[in-house]
Image (tube, coloured by chain):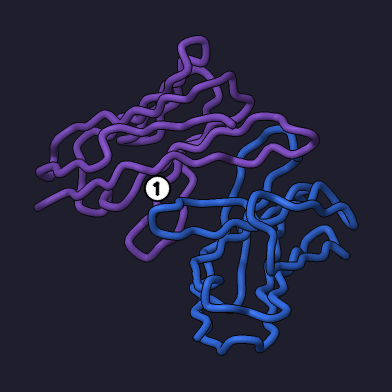
């Protein structure tokens, strides 16, 4: 099956700093999403981005499908950005397209 | 507000006592699925449904049942829970099975003693 690798596994930032999270995947995908899992365990949608670039406030994402990677940029980080960031990809498979999750990047933003 | 809801949010139960975790979405989505999240194993799909009365197994279906009698509801049933089913469970939905943004419910923390 498809492999999803995220880097770095852990990241500690001072409030106000910028960061880039990376997601590499091993095959062509039909679906790619970024999620933030907050300290209460909830999975929050950030971007649906199988290709191209999107921005939402301090967050932006770019997926280069031909090179099989996606990047999530966080600018001017805040303590509320802490949590785990997951990249998840979907590939058509016999009528199902389960999202396959990477192991995540654990972000800690310190005031 | 577009959302996926799950109940209960927290549940502690004992081995063998049947339970149901409900899931409902208000977005008229065709595709719904259940995941479990475990430390070191990540998120894994349990069951999915492409539409009413159409369900199939995901990666880890053993010990679980589902049904899809209405488009908005997709309950997860544990007929005889065991301690290895202690986990964080998520229901998810999206417009169709091929693509589209997938939305997750808030999660259900289940402990089986």
Q: Which quadrant of the structure image shows residue B4?
A: bottom right
Q: Give the color of chain A as drawn.
A: purple
Task: Residue at 68%, 33% (x, y): give it.
Answer: B99
Q: Determine whether B87 is above or below B59 in the image.
A: below
Q: Give the color of chain B as drawn.
A: blue
Task: Residue at 26%, 34% (x, y): give it.
Answer: A8
Image location of residue A108, percent across then percent down: 20, 50
Q: Chain of mark 1?
A: A
Q: Which quadrant of the structure image shows residue B34?
A: bottom right
* Pick the front one: B39 or A34: B39
* Pick the front one: B34 or A43: B34
Q: Determine whether A87 is above or below B37 in the image.
A: above
On the rendered structure, is A67 left or right of B103? Answer: left
Per the image, the residue denoted by label 1 is A36
Image location of residue A22, percent across then percent down: 34, 28
Q: Residues within 10 Å of mark 1 (few under 14, many from 20)?
A: many
């Amino acid at each position: 099956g498809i492999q999803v690798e995220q880097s770095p596994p852990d990241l500690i930032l001072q409030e106000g700093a910028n960061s880039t999270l990376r997601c590499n995947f091993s095959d062509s995908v039909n679906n790619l999403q970024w999620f933030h899992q907050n300290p209460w365990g909830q999975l929050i949608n950030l971007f649906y981005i199988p290709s191209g670039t999107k921005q939402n406030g301090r967050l932006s994402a770019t997926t280069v499908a031909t090179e099989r990677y996606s990047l999530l940029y966080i600018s001017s980080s805040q303590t509320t950005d802490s949590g785990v960031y997951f990249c998840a990809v979907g590939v058509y498979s016999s009528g199902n397209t389960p999202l396959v999750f990477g192991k995540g990047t654990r972000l800690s933003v310190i005031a | 507000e577009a959302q996926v809801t799950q109940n209960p949010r927290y549940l502690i139960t004992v081995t063998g006592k049947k339970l149901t975790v409900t899931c409902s979405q208000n977005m008229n989505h065709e595709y719904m699925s259940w995941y479990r999240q475990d430390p070191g194993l990540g998120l894994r799909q349990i069951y999915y449904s492409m539409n009413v009365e159409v369900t199939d197994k995901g990666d880890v279906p053993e010990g679980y049942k589902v049904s899809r009698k209405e488009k908005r509801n997709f309950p997860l049933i544990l007929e005889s829970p065991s301690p290895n089913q202690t986990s964080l469970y998520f229901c998810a939905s999206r417009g169709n099975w091929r693509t589209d943004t997938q939305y997750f419910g808030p999660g259900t923390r289940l402990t089986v003693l």
